[in-house]
Amino acid sequence: MSKKENAEGFEKSMEKLRQAADQIQRPDISIEDALKCYEEGMKCYDSCMNILESAKQKIETEEVPKA
């Protein structure tokens, strides 16, 4: 996956995560809908964390001094 695709994927996942959090905070949301939003939010969170972990590994690899 390219850097641009990672950035776009991260941004999309973050937006979906924000939307899920907003939905959960609504006072009129049912328990069932809140649970669906939570599950969707957790998928988005995992996606974001995977992208960040991949970026971290690339940064650490590039920081290793070459002999």
Image (cartoon, grey):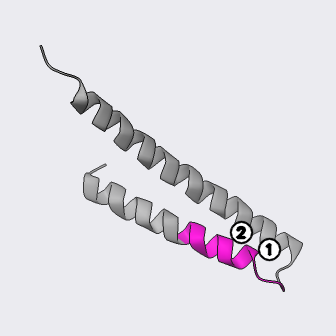
Q: Quick check: 42 above or below 60?
A: below
- Badge number at residue 44: none
| Label 2: few (<14), some (14–19) or many (≥20) C-alpha neighbours in 10 Å | many
- Horizontal side, residue 54 vs residue 34: left or right: left
Quarter of the image where one finds residue 64: top left
Mark 1 surroundings: few (<14), some (14-19) or many (≥20) residues within 10 A: few
Query: Furthest residue to the top?
Result: 67
Total marks shown come to: 2
Circle 2 is placed at which residue position?
Answer: 37
In the rendered structure, does residue 22 fall within the stretch colored magenta? yes
Tag 2 and tag 1, C-beta contact below 8 Å? yes
Q: Is the magenta stretch mostly helix, strand or loop?
A: helix
| Residue under the image location 87 percent in, 72 percent down | 31
Q: Give the range drawn in magenta.
A: 16-28
The residue at the point 27 percent across, 59 percent down is: 4
Label 2 sits on a secondary structure element that is helix
Reply above or below: 58 against 9.
Answer: above
Q: How far apart are marks 2 and 1 (CA)?
A: 6 Å
